[in-house]
Image (cartoon, grey):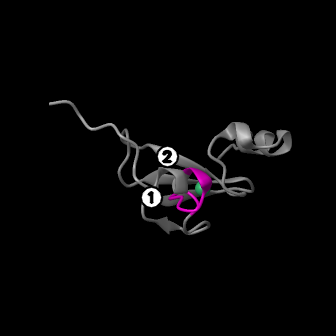
């Protein structure tokens, strides 16, 4: 039997930011999907509760909702990619 690979029913809402798990609870230390391990100017990082791989960390943009990094301005993109946790 083939796996079901259809998009979620609320895909358009997720992509538009109306229902985005990354933006929900922005700034929280303890989100549904992980625990914040880094707080930066441009991004926060969360150790995932349900990681793709052990130790997988989600880096979340702290500005407006975007679906892809290509939607960031040049300045925002420089800030996003320059994060260096200490
Ligand atoms: Zn979002």
Q: Is residue 35 above or below residue 12?
A: below
Whether residue 11 sits left or right of residue 69 in the image: it is: left
Q: Residue furthest right?
A: 75
Camera-nearest residue between 32 and 11: 11
Residue nearest the viewer, comparing 32 with 56: 32
Is 9 above or below relative to 26? above
**Position of residue 37 measured from the top left corner of the image (x, y, whole percent):** 54, 57
Residue 47 coordinates in the image, percent (x, y) = 46, 52
Q: Is residue 22 above or below residue 52?
A: below
Assign a secondary structure to mark 1: strand
Q: Secondary structure at mark 2?
A: strand
- For the N terminus, the image quarter is top left
Dot 1: within a 10 Å radius of its alpha carbon, few (fewer than 14), some, or many (20 or more) residues? some
Residue 34 circle label = 1
As measured in the structure, the alpha-carbon distance from the residue carrying label 2 to the one carrying label 1 is 8 Å
* Residue stretch rendered in magenta on the structure: 15-23
| Rendering quarter of residue 79 | top right
Where ligand 1 lies, by quadrant?
A: bottom right
Above or below, comparing residue 35 to residue 43 in the picture: below
Residue located 48% across and 50% down the image: 11
Quarter of the image where one finds residue 22: bottom right
Q: Residue at x 40, y 53 (%)?
A: 9
Q: Residue at x 44, y 43 (%)?
A: 56
Q: Horizontal and vertical percent for residue 26?
A: 60, 66
The residue indicated by pointer 2 is: 57
Circle 2 crowding by C-alpha within 10 Å: few under 14, some 14–19, many from 20 = some
Picture quadrant where residue 4 is located: top left
Q: Earlier in the sequence, mark 2 or mark 1?
A: 1
């Amino acid at each position: 039997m083939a796996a079901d690979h259809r998009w979620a029913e609320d895909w358009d809402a997720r992509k538009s930011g109306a229902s985005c798990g990354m933006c929900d609870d922005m700034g929280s230390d303890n989100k549904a999907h992980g625990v914040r391990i880094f707080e930066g100017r441009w991004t926060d990082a969360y150790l995932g509760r349900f990681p793709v791989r052990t130790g997988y960390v989600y880096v979340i943009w702290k500005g407006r909702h975007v679906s892809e990094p290509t939607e960031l301005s040049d300045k925002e993109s420089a800030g996003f990619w320059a994060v260096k946790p200490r």
